[in-house]
Image (cartoon, rainbow, N blue to C red):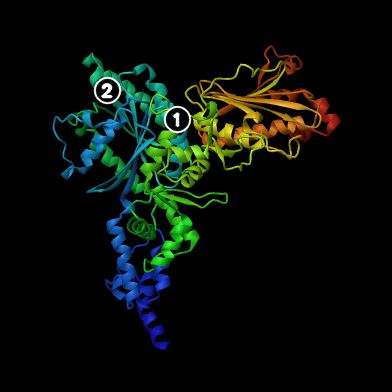
Amino acid sequence: NQWDRLYLFDLLRIVGTTALHISCCFGDLESVQLLLSAPGIKVDIRNGSNQSPVMLATNYDVLALHQNYMKSCDNFPIHSVCKVVLCGNSQAGKSTLTQSILKYLRAPEYEIPVGEDHQSCVVPLTTGIQYHDVKHKDGSMKVYDLAGHKEYYSSHSSCLEAISLGSPSTFLLLTDIHNVANVKVELNYWATMIENVCSKCPHPSEIIVVGTHIDEVVDKARLPGLCELLKGYAEEAVKKTRHHFAGFVPLNTTHFTSLGKEFFPLLLATNEVVRKHSPAISLSCHVLNAFLDQKVPSDVEAITLSDLLLLLANEGKHGLSTNKSDIVSFLATLADKGSIMFFPNADQTDDWIVIKQDVLLKKVIGKIFAPASIDPFSVSSNTGIIPISELKRIFPEHDTDMIVPFMLKGELCHTVVDEVGASKTLSDCVFCPALVHTSRPSDVLTPENSFEWQICTVNGDEFFTTRSLYAIIRRLSIKFTSPSEDTKYKKELRPFSHVCQVWNYGITWTTELTKTCITFIVEMSESFQCLSLIASATHKNDAEYPRKLKGVLDVLNQCLLDFCPSVAIAEFIRCPLWASRLRSSSAIVKLSALRQKLLNEGKALCGVHGGEADLEKWL
């Protein structure tokens, strides 16, 4: 009405009046809710008359909404959260340091108990990822203690990718200072891992390198020079990434007295840097976090997105949008902040929200991928195939409907058929490449005069990850060993074990086409610096042969792009027949050199077939 328009005109004349001021003043609940959900909104901003938006509120519902948002921000301050990830090889001292950090943060005024030995509180071998949520006087810290066994590396990467999409983290990279010979290799590996898992995060993380076990250095006079050498190695490894080197600290992790002087102040200062570089988040994320904490029963480990939406609709008066896309966005932010694990599914299964992360990361993933020395987990004949009924037997207290989607989303497994002729569905078994520990079968031989394509790391300090290898095996086993229109098995569901052979470093399968039969072998070198594709066809002139070859190469390159984006590569071709034609003494030719050689020597071919552009396309 006219009076409202006049009042609005007067309000707009006041310097500093915002849309939130106006919405509160006119009691527009929908607009207030929309504005409060915007990332970085300043709720208590004052205008020229020193009025905050809530001071102008004329509607009780608006006032109640504002109070609910402010209460959630105070009780569940997501904006002050910092993720701290401890990584390093087994026995580096990660669990000991984790316990020291927890005790330090929980002490009043960050007091350091002088001379206290903390070794007795440590579990000798970590399984999976130990998750801790610590609230302290300066904010909140989500601590992830990664087990150092190689069997966990792939699942570690999958979990870290899920929490490294928007906000940076503080990484504590621990290395045994006593084991100087392997320090450089360890640092390069973990720095590469950090670079790869954080590839989708727009902001660089902070890396503190910790040299542990200084008490085991017998000649104490060597210690300063040793620390300086390791610091140089650490700086060199981190500078190869886009992340920041925050410092190097030598520690005896079992005693607080050696920790307090340098480490804890550095950790707190680094966390503050990480918080400042973290993107602003919506206040609705605080409200949703409070809702999950207060409304979801305490004994529930995980819920589906549909159940959460139903709970939101039934509860009401929480001030949150019940629109699915909005809630998914808020959940993704909470996952990025380490408050939950959230993985939307592309298939028909419902999206899962894991509230108790320690259950999933330690008790479930920690058991499935545990090395035999910690917790033997028997799968059928070491094929990597796990019947879902077996998962239900091993984890009777956990929901397998949550476990399997998590593993599928993280590309840790895929569903398969276990037997021929059995009345089974595609969801009866899962195949986990990481659980195959056998060597290359003796009957898998490289055919003579076969074609080989090699993808190698350019830098001797770089390497491909186990995560990329298992993703390659998984994707190849899905795309090229499943029944398809160009195989004679197009109407049969063949058992997985009859389709391909898998070992700890590779996979082989045979594709039968109309005129030819092609055998493929894809294998990673033990150094993880060379990935080979070997192909042999009964009739190489079949037009389907290069098409199939290109399809496999596309999968390999896409996997390396997805999981090793920071690694520089060079491609080589090995073909004995080409060696003589190219007047080369070696059967291995670098791809770029081969292209140039063919271009230089192919002028006659260009004249016949229509020019250099056609030759480029043919190459």
Please tell me whether residue 200 is drawn above or below residue 217 in the rendered image.
below
Give percent across and percent down for residue 557. 60, 33
Quote the CA–CA distance across marks 1 and 2: 32 Å
Give percent across and percent down for residue 35. 41, 66
Amino acid carrying label 1: it is: Phe
> Foreground mark, 1 or 2?
1
Q: Is residue 472 left or right of residue 111?
A: right
Q: Is residue 42 left or right of residue 257?
A: right
Counting other residues with Cα less than 10 Å from the Cα at mark 2, is it few (<14), some (14-19), or many (20 or more)?
A: many
In the picture of the structure, the residue carrying the numbered disc 2 is 213
Evaluate whether residue 294 shows in this view: yes
Closer-to-camera residue (160/185): 160
Instruction: Give the mark, 1 or 2, whose residue is nearer the N terminus.
Output: 2
Q: Label for residue 377?
A: 1
Q: Residue furthest front?
A: 422
User: Residue 502 falls in which quadrant of the image?
Assistant: top right
